[in-house]
Amino acid sequence: MRVEHCKSCHAPIVWAGTASGKLMPVDVDSSPAGNLRLEYTDAGELVAEVVPAGSQDALRTSHFATCPNAAKHRRKVRHG
């Protein structure tokens, strides 16, 4: 796993693919409240799979949920 650091809060994160094909920052440290399982695909890509919170498989949390500066990084939604 290639660990990087959040540019805002400097917490350790990894980038994982999502079901929609986007990359999402994920906290490196596991959390009992997490709802993401990290797995490698056959192609060697790290992906995050959403699982029920509290599940034994739920080891990680999206960094969007834990970063104190997450609002700075949200994209503005364009309507119309």
Image (cartoon, rainbow, N blue to C red):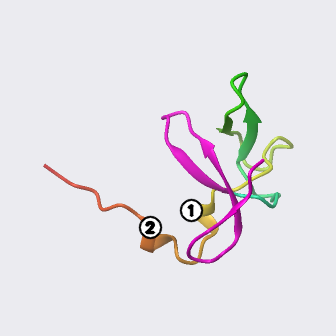
| 29 lies left or right of 35 | right
Q: Please, which residue is most extreme toward the top here?
A: 42
Whether the residues at callouts 1 and 2 have beta carbons within 8 Å, the answer is: yes
Q: Name which residue type carries label 2.
A: His
Q: Quadrant of residue 61?
A: bottom right
Label 2: which residue? 73
User: Magenta part of the protein: which range?
Assistant: 1-26
Which label's residue is closer to the chain start, 1 or 2?
Answer: 1
| 79 lies left or right of 36 | left
Q: Residue at x 36, y 61 (%)?
A: 75
Q: Name which residue type carries label 1.
A: Phe
Disc 1 vs disc 2: which is toward the camera? Answer: 2
Q: How many marks?
A: 2
Along the line of sight, which residue is nearer the eye, 69 or 41? Answer: 41
Instruction: Tell me, for residue 64, which label it has, or none.
Output: 1
Counting from the top left corner in percent of width and height, residue 62 is at: 63, 56
Instruction: Tell me, for residue 15, which label it has, or none.
Output: none
Counting from the top left corner in percent of width and height, residue 73 is at: 44, 67
Circle 2 residues within 10 Å: few <14, some 14–19, many ≥20? few
Q: Residue at x 48, y 35 (%)?
A: 20
Q: Is residue 39 magenta?
A: no
Q: CA distance from mark 1 to mark 2?
A: 9 Å
| 21 lies left or right of 38 | left
Q: Residue at x 30, y 62 (%)?
A: 76
